[in-house]
Amino acid sequence: METPTPLASLQQDVAALAAVWAGALPAFGVLPSDAQGSFELMSGSGLVSVTDALTRLRRTTDALLVRAAGEVGRRSGPEFGTEGLAKKNGFSTPTRLLASSTGGSTGEAARLLAVGAATASRQDFSGQARPARHPHVAAALDAGLISVDAAGAITGMLDRVAPRADAAVVEGIEKILAERAAELPLSLLLRVIKQAEARLDPDGADLRDEERWLGRSLTIRENRHGMTELTARLDPESASLVTTAIEALVSDGLRAKSARADDEPVITDDRSIPQRQADALVEIMRHVLGCTQTIAPLAAVTTVTRIDLDALRTGLGSGSIDGIDQPVSAGTIRRLAASADLIPMVLGTDSVPLDVGRTARLFTKTQRLALHERDGGCASCGQNINYTHAHHIRWWKRHHGPTDITNGVLLCSFCHHMIHRDGWNIHATPTEVWFIPPPHVDPDQVPRLGGKARFSLPRSAAA
C-alpha cells in the first residue's frame, strides 16, 4: 500500500475544488478565463460550495505553512548562532524571514512561529519521538478543521495557564476547545477560551482583574480634521458601567424608532449605531454637567452579574457581567455587589415565576433575565445582549403560544427577520436552543445548537 505524502491532503483539496468549480458553472456556453468572470456565472449554491472548498484548501495550506514555520523557528534557534537559518539568509530573526516570505506583518509571522512550535512533535534526550505540546490542537490543525488564528488563540491561553493548572485538566480543556474551534466562528470561540482560562486558573482571576484595571486609559486628541477622538481602554468592571449606560440610551432610541415605523415622521432618524452611541455619550455628559433629573431610559437600567453561589460565598472563582465577554473574578463581583442594590435571582425555583402561560403577552423582567442566562445574547448570531429582544417561538396571537421560557428566545432584529423570512424552526428547552434550518438551506435539516450552550464549557470540564 502506497504511503500517503504530506501533500496528499493538499492534492485532494485541489481536486475537490476543481470538481465543485466545474459543477458551479453553466453546462453550456463560452466560459470566461478569469476568476472574476467565473464567479459571476456561478449559481448561488455553487458559489457557496466553491467558497467552502477554497476555505478547506486554505486551511490545508495554512497547516503546511505552520509546519514549515515551526521548522524555520527550530533551525533559527539561538543555539545555532550565526549558522541559524534566519541569519544565514540575511534576517535577524525567523519572524522577519517569515514576514518577508509571506508578505504579511511580523505579528502574523510571529503567530505562525508560535503555533508551529506549540503543535510540532518533539524528541526527548534519547531521540525518541514525543507528541506535540498541544496534540489535540495539532491534530485538528493538520486535519484542516481549525484555522491558524483559532489554534493560536487556544495554544496561547493554554501556555499562559500551564504553570498553575493541573496538566490532566489542561489536556481535557484543550480537547474541548479543539472540538469547539471546528464548530464556531473565531468571535464566539474567543468567548469559550476566556471562560476556559477562568476555569483553569481561578487563583489568577484577581491578578488578571488587577492588571486590566491598572491598564485602563483614556486619551483625548483633536485630529487634523477638527474632530476630537476619544480612545478608551477599560477593565470589564469599568466597561460594564459605561456600555450599560450608552447601550440603554441607544436601545431606547431604536425601540422608539421601531414603534414609529408605521407613522410618517416629520424628520427621518437615519443615524448609524456609532452615531447613536456618540450622541448617547454626549447626552450623559450633558446630564452630569447641568441636569438635575435622571435620564429616563437610565432610571430602570440594571447591570446584571452572574456567579455561582459557592464562588460568591468563598470569593474564589469567577463570574460574568452581561454584555462583557471577559469573565471577572469573584472578588470583582463581590465589590460590585457591595455598592449595588441587589435583586438576587435563583433560576428555576418555585419562587420565580418563569412561566406565565397566556395571561400576559410580554415576557417579564425575571423571564428576560432567565433567557439572558440561557441564550447569552442573540441565540442565533451571538449579538450583544443589549441589542436583543425576547420573542415568542410560537407566536402569541397567531399560534396561541404561551409566554414561557421554553417558548421564548433572544434574537437580534436581523436574525428575527431572517428566521421568519426563510422559515427556520426553533426548539427550546430551559437550558438549550436548537435552530432547524429549512430544506433549501440544509436538505437534511440537521438541528444547529444556538445560545450560550455553544460557547459555555461543561461544568465537568473544570473538575
Image: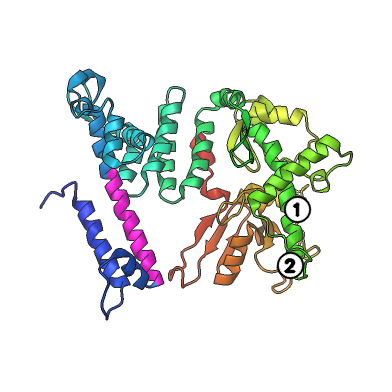
Q: Is residue 348 left or right of residue 456?
A: right
Residue at the image position 31 percent from the left and 51 percent from the top: 58
The residue nearer to you, when weighing 438 against 152, is 152
Residue 313 seen in this snapshot: yes
Q: Earlier in the sequence, mark 1 or mark 2?
A: 1
Residue type at the position of mark 2: Ala
Q: Position of residue 57 (x, y in %)?
A: 29, 54
Residue at the image position 57 percent from the left and 24 percent from the top: 211
Residue type at the position of mark 1: Asp
Q: Which residue is mark 1?
A: 252
Residue 300 in the image: above or below residue 156: below
Q: Which residues are magenta?
A: 44-63
Q: Which SS does the magenta portion mostly show?
A: helix
Q: CA distance from mark 1 to mark 2?
A: 14 Å
How many numbered dots are placed on residues in this image?
A: 2
Outermost residue toward the right?
A: 292
Q: Which residue is mark 2?
A: 261
Q: Is residue 48 magenta?
A: yes
Residue 289 in the image: above or below residue 23: above
Residue at the image position 71 percent from the left and 74 percent from the top: 398
Is mark 1 in CB contact (under 8 Å) with mark 2?
no
Q: Is residue 242 magenta?
A: no
The residue nearer to you, when weighing 430 against 130, is 130
